């Protein structure tokens, strides 16, 4: 039935269930065991199929959770880049300032009237600018 990983557990569970029956007759024990095992495997497959069907329905899946650790790193990088932001264009400064204050990339794109890839590009330019500035001062990040 495709339950190779759980076969031992299912057979053991069925054997314990059947052995605990109060009126177990020696005749027909194999048939009873086969029937219970078959039903247990069928129930397990039905549960697995229902779970797979539920997971295919996007409305039942939990919404993707943002990576908060990456948000913190982005905010720290933006704050770091703002320290050495002399000479950056106003648009890049605005993106850095918004990110440093915890605004998401999607919100920054909406606020600035651009796209998320444009925001990412502006952040790369600002970080590269800050790195070059630090190298000129003799300090490496």
Image (cartoon, grey):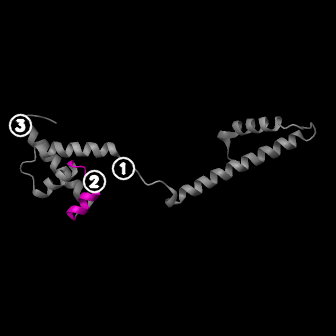
Secondary structure under tag 1 reads: loop
- Quarter assignment of residue 34: top right
Mark 2 neighbour density, 10 Å: few (under 14) some (14–19) many (20 or more): some
Spatial separation of the CA atoms under disc 3 and disc 2? 31 Å
Residue occupied by mark 3: 137
> Image point 15% across, 55% down: which residue?
94
- Pointers 1 and 3 in contact (C-beta within 8 Å): no
- Name the front one of labels 3 and 2: 2
Residue occupied by mark 2: 104
Query: In the visual, does 79 lie left or right of 68?
Result: left
Total residue callouts: 3
Q: Position of residue 71 (x, y in %)?
A: 29, 46
- Quarter assignment of residue 131: top left
Q: Position of residue 44 (x, y in %)?
A: 68, 48
- Disc ID at residue 66: 1
**Along the polypeptide, which appears first: circle 1 or circle 3?**
1
**Along the polypeptide, which appears first: circle 2 or circle 1?**
1
Secondary structure under tag 3 reads: helix
> Image point 40% across, 50% down: which residue?
65
> Image point 22% across, 56% down: which residue?
119
Q: Position of residue 41 (x, y in %)?
A: 72, 46
Magenta stretch contains residue 77: no
- Pointers 2 and 1 in contact (C-beta within 8 Å): yes
Which region shows up in magenta?
100-113
Secondary structure under tag 2 reads: loop
**Along the polypeptide, which appears first: circle 3 or circle 2?**
2
Query: In the visual, does 33 lie left or right of 131?
Result: right
Q: Main secondary structure of the magenta part?
A: helix
Spatial separation of the CA atoms under disc 2 and disc 1? 10 Å
Magenta stretch contains residue 112: yes
């Amino acid at each position: 039935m495709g339950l190779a990983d759980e076969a031992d557990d299912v057979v053991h569970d069925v054997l314990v269930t059947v052995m605990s029956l109060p009126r177990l007759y020696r005749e027909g024990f194999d048939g009873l065991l086969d029937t219970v095992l078959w039903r247990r495997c069928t129930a397990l497959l039905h549960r697995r199929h229902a779970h797979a069907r539920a997971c295919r329905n996007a409305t039942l899946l939990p919404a993707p959770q943002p990576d908060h650790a990456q948000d913190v790193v982005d905010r720290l990088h933006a704050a770091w880049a703002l320290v050495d932001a002399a000479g950056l264009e106003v648009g890049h400064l605005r993106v850095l300032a918004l990110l440093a204050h915890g605004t998401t990339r999607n919100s920054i794109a909406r606020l600035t009237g651009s796209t998320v890839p444009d925001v990412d590009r502006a952040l790369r330019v600002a970080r590269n600018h800050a790195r070059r500035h630090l190298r000129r001062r003799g300090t490496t990040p």
